[in-house]
Image (cartoon, rainbow, N blue to C red):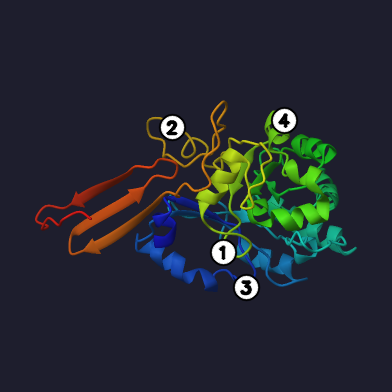
Amino acid sequence: MRECNRLGLTSVGDHGGSGQFYPNDYQIILDLARRKELTLRIGYWLMGQKRGEELGQYEGWAKMVKPGDGDGFLRMLGGGEYLVWAAADVANFGYDFNGFAPVMEKELGGVMAFVAQRGWPFRLHTVYDSSIERVLNVVEQVAKEVPLERLRWGLEHCETISERNLERLAKLGGSIGIQNRIYIGENAFVRTFGAEVGAAAPPIARIREMGIPLAAGTDGNRANSHNPWLSIYWLVTGRTAGGASSGMTATCSVAWTRCDTGRKGARGPARRREPRARSRQGSGPISRSSRPITSAFRTRRSSVSSRCSRWWAAKSCTRRIRTRGSRPRRSR
């Protein structure tokens, strides 16, 4: 949490991960929430862990917890980003993906129908258009039995999603979550898909034109850096770590995908302000040598001091926060 706070984060989303079993592996964060010691607002999805046994896991979890459980600092949001391992495509751009196993549709459909019937929003890991094609086939089948219009579900990554599948997704009422994985994976992506595809991946402009809810993140910290400023830099400038530029800019909001519309992602009275990446129309690119926003907190007795450096401004600011009775210290 201190590392996230240092980078200016106040809210994060946890899309699960392999080896994270609920509730045993969540006890530390649950204990911190009970003691009111969280310094981040955390929303989490539960991800299937045992290949071939995911439906049984979700049946067990449904008896323990439901979406919305928790408070403003820790809240359960739904299932994903893997509902079943049979629907997991390769996240490394340097490897060829040969497609899902034939059993994917049956296993994913069973779990998706189960969580949807119980009102669980869900997220699905989909990198390639061939993966998205088959996953949307399953979503369409489930939607015939369980209405999904009010269920805030969506796909994650979608670097190579096609126009046809964007239209299918929009019709089904889904959303898309993107991350700056191309920022560091540019070379591997271009080798696999070509420079033309790489320059337009993911198709953010088209997603926005179609009105599809769009969220942005980092995919940290195994597949990518957890630093949100690298993602914001990529979103605002279109530049990768290697210096290539796609010329894209983006405006994103995560609040819709977390059922936090009205509480996060907007400015105004009683709204919690969240970092947003906004289109910089008519302005020059941010210097690659610019420093990221960070803050370093030191606590000693009852005195707290903080120092921050602005990301794209040369000047820095220093401020002191003191409680009554604390001894003043010289600012660095």
Q: Earlier in the sequence, mark 4 or mark 1?
A: 1
Q: Earlier in the sequence, mark 1 or mark 3?
A: 3
Residue type, mark 2 in image: Arg
- In this view, 210 is above or below 226: above
Query: Which residue is at a point 77% across and 52% down the rendered structure image?
Result: 190
**Mark 1, residue position:** 64
Residue 267: image tag = 2
Q: CA distance from mark 1 to mark 3?
A: 19 Å
Query: Which residue is at a point 51% across and 55% down the rendered structure image?
Result: 227
Expressed as whole percent of the image width and height from the top left, the position of residue 232 reads 54, 44
Residue type, mark 3 in image: Gly
Query: Which residue is at a point 41% across and 50% down the rendered structure image?
Result: 8
**Mark 3, residue position:** 19
Q: CA distance from mark 2 to mark 4?
A: 24 Å
27 or 200: nearer the viewer: 200
Residue type, mark 1 in image: Met
**Mark 4, residue position:** 210
Quadrant of the image occupied by residue 161: top right
Q: CA distance from mark 2 to mark 3?
A: 37 Å
Q: CA distance from mark 4 to mark 1?
A: 38 Å
Q: Earlier in the sequence, mark 2 or mark 3?
A: 3
